[in-house]
Amino acid sequence: MACQTTTNQSGLTAHSPRGPLTRNGRLAQLVLDSAPDAMVVVNQQGKIILVNRQTEQLFGYSRNELLDQPVEILMPERFRKRHVEHLARYVAEPRILAMGTGLDLYARYRDGSEFPIEIMLSPLRMGRQLLVSSVIRDVTERKRADVESQSQRLTTQRLLDLRSQELRSKSEELHVAEAMATIGTLTAGILHDLGNALQPIRCHLSALHKHESIDAIDNVKAIENAMDYIGDLCKRLRLLMARTERQDNAATDLNEWWREVTPLLTGVLPRQVKLEPAIPDDLPLVQIGRVELTQAVFNLAHNASRALRGTEPAILKIWAVPCADGHTICVRVTDNGEGMRPETRERILNSTFTNGTQDAEAGLGLRLVKSIVSRAKGSIDIDSEPGKGTTVTLVLPTEHNGSPLRASPCAKSS
């Protein structure tokens, strides 16, 4: 089919299926078609006068479908009105201008779907006519890669944050472990000295037994009980220092235990603290060693005495009742002291709770109690409110094998 040369409204020679291209027109078209990106040239009115092959391939239009059409045909509907205003401003002040970098610019395929683009605008003068050359680049793949890269960065950052949190937690645990190791070293030395000190005391007590004064015998008996406890405690601590896993699973009669422990406890409590014990006679044996139970209750009583400073009257209640499940015993230590703040109560059993106050010391004692009770397959619970005192409950398994125990009416009260 013969081709004719046609001249569009801008005065430039353009493709026409009805005439041959001029030499200059063919050269211009060859230059445009060799460009790696889509290129569109428009006049001052925004009408398309030249496109290259990449434009046809990118947008899905044939060249003849685009020539003399407003360039807005290649844009989504929402951008068209605004583009007319932009073109007018550009014609008034033409310059090389990059658009789309850091922005969300979109073009429109022939089928109506959209894709992200970047545009480079360049002014081109042909006589008195100002033309605008647009280089259009499809950045779909780059945007997709950016999204994937951002997602990977976020995932990596989350993993780094989690790892950093784990490392901080491990560091805190290591700090506590080092502190506990230091305490253990000091304790080992103290235990050695205690053991040496107990031996001559026993010799003197043996001599006192020969005097049959009733008062002397009572006093000697109290001292012997104290020594027995200290001796058993030293043995237990030595086992712990040696990292022996042995656990004294001997069951304990709470009434017998309390009779032995009362002189010790009253001897260490401040004078202003009134001790109110309540240990029923008919309770079954609890599955915890006597030394372990004494350690636990002594720690709780010590914490309570600190909380009772300045309280009038200062009351410490140590009591035991069948728990509601009918198979365990609740041993409770209750004080009417200052109580704990909710955040302290929630965190005080945490191994990394170190707030630099007396709460941290109480927390260490409670964690030791928790460890003792856990080894006996029991549990610990804390009920406390500011100004309303604190009750720490040790839930201990029993030797009872018959029907469930009848819970006391005050089993849940403090």
Image: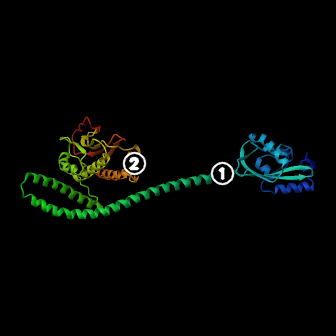
Three-letter code for the amino acid on which mark 2 is drawn: Arg
The answer to whether residue 393 is seen in the rendering is yes
Q: Earlier in the sequence, mark 1 or mark 2?
A: 1
Circle number at residue 347: 2
Residue 364 position within the rendered picture, expressed as x and y whole percent measured from the top left:
34, 53
- Check disc 1: other Cα within 10 Å, few if <14, some if 14-19, many if 20+: few
Residue 382 position within the rendered picture, expressed as x and y whole percent measured from the top left:
34, 44
Q: How many numbered discs?
A: 2
Secondary structure found at label 1: helix
Figure quadrant of the C terminus: top left
Residue 311: quadrant of the picture: top left
Of residues 395 and 368, the one nearer the viewer is: 368
Disc 1 or disc 2, which is closer to the eye?
A: 2
Q: Label 1 vs label 2: CA separation?
A: 46 Å
Three-letter code for the amino acid on which mark 1 is drawn: Arg
- Identity of the residue drawn at 24% across and 42% down: 320
- Identity of the residue drawn at 35% across and 40% down: 387
Secondary structure found at label 2: helix
**Mark 1 — residue?**
144
Q: Is residue 292 left or right of residue 154?
A: left
Of residues 147 and 390, the one nearer the viewer is: 390
Residue 255 position within the rendered picture, expressed as x and y whole percent measured from the top left:
18, 45
